[in-house]
Structure formats: C-alpha cells, structure tokens
Image (tube, rainbow, N blue to C red):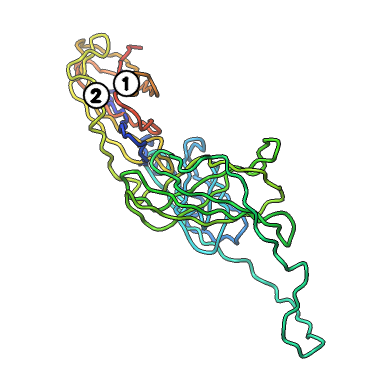
Amino acid sequence: MKRTKRLAIAMVTALTLAVATPCVVPDMGVTVSAASKVKLNKKKVTIVKGKKYKLKLQHAKAAKVKWSTKNKKVATVSKKGVVTAKKKGSTNIIAKYGKKKYTCKVTVKNPKKTPTPVTPAPTVDTTAPVTPSTVTPAATPVEVRTAVPTVFNGTTVADFHISKEASVTGGYRYSYYGTVNNTSPYTLSGIAVHITGYAANGTVVEGDEYGYTTGSFAAGQAVGFNEFFYSNYDIAYFTITKVTPSFANNDEQLNVSGVTLPAINSQIGSNIYLTAASMTATHNIGTFDTIDANFEFTAKCATNEWIDVVYTLNAYDAAGNVISTHTYDNGYFARSVTENQVKIYWDDMPCNVARIGITAAVK
C-alpha cells in the first residue's frame, strides 16, 4: 500500500496593473532535505576590479538557480554565477533556489599600482607640457533610435543622451546620461537602463551596456544616471532595449485582489471539486514583467480510492488569452482521504494576469 502523503502544490498570481509591475519572491520548490545540503561555494570573496570569479550553488540544479546582484555598479553576475568586478566597493550576490536565498558578500578592490619612475624636467619650468597624445577631442552626439520618453513597464525613460570621443588609448569612449521616472507603485533601490550599439550596417557590436541609478526612491520619483564605457567600435547608433529594477523589498507582498480565482465548489476534474482557493504574490528579481506567486486551494474527491492527479493551472489576460501555463503532476488522493490542501508555487508568472483557471486530470 502506498503511504499517505500530504499534497503540496504551489500556484501563483499576478496583478493587472495599467503599468506592468515588478516582482520578486522566495522560491517554494526545494524540499527540506535538499535545502539542507545546498550551499554557496563561497560566503565572502574579494575580487580585483576587472577580474571574474565563478560562484556555485552546490547540490543545486544549475538551471534552477537565479542569480542577482544588489549593486550592479560594484559587481555584476551572469546567469551561470560568474561575477565580474566593476568598481571598488562591496555588494551582495544572491543565489535564489526554490524558496531559499543564499548570499555571498563580494568586495571589489582596485588593482595595485606599480610606481612609475619620474624623470626630472630638464628645466625649472613647472608648467606641464601638453602633447597631442594627451589632448582629448571634443565629444560628438550619437544617434539614439528609441524615441523618448519611452515606457518600460514600471518606468519611463524621460531623457536620454549619448556621445562619443576618441580615446587616447585607442577606440572610443561613450558617455551616456538621462533621467528615469519610477512609475511603478513600489519603492526601488536602483534602475538599470540597458542599451545596444549598432554598426552602420545594422550589426550589433555592443550589447547590453547599462546606466545604473542608486539610492532608494519612491513611486513617482525621478532619478538620473550618468555612465560611460569604452569600445573599439565606431558605433553608428544605439537603442534602449530594456529597463531592469532592483526592489527595495524583494519579499514585499503584492496586491493581487484583482485576479479572479476559480469559483468555490466548481468541478475541476472527474469527481474532483474545488472547496477553497487563495493566492499571494511577490516581486520577481530584476523585472517588471513577471511575479512569483503562491496559490493554495483545497480539492475534494468524491470517490474513496487512491488516485494520482495532474493539476494544470492556466493564467489568462484580460482578453481571455492563455498567457502562461503551469503543471503539477504529483497530486493524489488516498483511500479514506477525500479532501486535501494543495499548495502550488509558480515563479515567472506574467504581471498582466487577470484570471486563474485550474483543471485536475486523473493519471
């Protein structure tokens, strides 16, 4: 006889905001035994500016780990956990796995400078000579083919400019600055404005450079950014590709009361009925597009036998289109246990969810 299990499922929710909202949440998909084994290979690491370091979440499935950084100005992290030191300072790199978050403190130091011998000037004239190699040519504007103001979900890029000048070491120095309005209803700790550079023939030559704002700013507040980068390419034009946020509170509970849930006592499968349902949601790391949601419901089975159940959850937009689907195939009812509480965790649910549907199929 199969032993009795307690059903646990997780489901998600979303909000319908006139402006898409940001979201991030702890993950519920890790068992207790697995979570006790999972750990970062380093809790603290010091990296020299410009260098990289590979973090690894041990005993975890790499594809399921979500990496993020608290301050992209100090250090960035790739989807595979490769940390790149950008600027002197310290920040936290976060690995999110299931409902758990694992943090590594990263300290970035400047490289040691080797003193350069100074040759005494042949005369007593203390005025430093200016040579052609030290003269920086005037900056010239570069075309931006994204009209501003432009809206990216919970933000509006209100102002954007970029210019280039020849670098004394070769190539070009690109400077860009602008203003972003936080049009989301949430307090943010930073916004990254991503740009892509193109050659005259339309080929991408520089991808995903970004200007990053820092400091906490509330809903409706404007904040500026001013960044630069070097490139060997003579870039003809740029586009603004996306805006990614950092939320002041990633675990903030979102208002999902506007999402319609399945009706209580509705039939969701053969002899299976829904007797209770609720949902909550939090921010998804680094995006206004999706949220992490939890859906709890109680299902009742009218038969007194062991059955295995597959639950399918559909997220619909306001027009009634299915915009995302989540399947949980570990559901079951045991003999003499006709009602079970189910918990479903669903990360990366689109923010424009208007309704949740659920069906149950017997295996």
Q: Mark 1 vs mark 2: give the one in front.
A: 2
Numbered mark located on residue 261 in the image: 2
Residue placed most toward the observer, 60 or 199: 199
What residue is shown with label 1? 331
Foreground of the two, 152 or 85? 152
Compared with residue 348, is residue 234 higher up or lower down, i.e. above or below? below
Task: Find the residue positioned furthest to the right.
Answer: 122
Query: Mark 2 Cα within 10 Å, few/some/many (few <14, many 20+)?
Result: some
Q: Nearer the viewer, residue 39 or 240?
A: 240
Q: Quadrant of the C terminus?
A: top left
Instruction: Report x, y in % for residue 124.
Output: 77, 90
103 displayed left or right of 352:
right
Which residue is more in the foreground, 269 or 223? Answer: 223
Residue 324 position by quadrant: top left
* Residue displayed at 53% across by 42% down: 240
Q: Position of residue 113 (x, y in %)?
A: 67, 71
Horizontal and vertical percent position of residue 88? 54, 64
Please give the count of numbered marks on the rendered protein: 2
Mark drawn on residue 133: none
Q: Amino acid at mark 2?
A: Leu
Considering only order in the chain, which callout, 2 or 1, is on the residue closer to the N terminus?
2
Disc 1: CA contacts within 10 A as few (<14), some (14-19) or many (>=20): many
- Mark 2, secondary structure of its residue: loop
Q: Is residue 267 above or below residue 137?
A: above
Identify the residue shown where x is 20% and y is 11%.
304
Residue 125 position by quadrant:
bottom right
Left-right relation of 109 to 230: left
Q: Amino acid at mark 1?
A: Gly
Is residue 175 in sight in this rendering?
Answer: yes
- Asked whether the viewer can see residue 34, the reply is no
Q: Is residue 65 left or right of residue 328?
A: right
In the image, is residue 252 above or below residue 316?
below
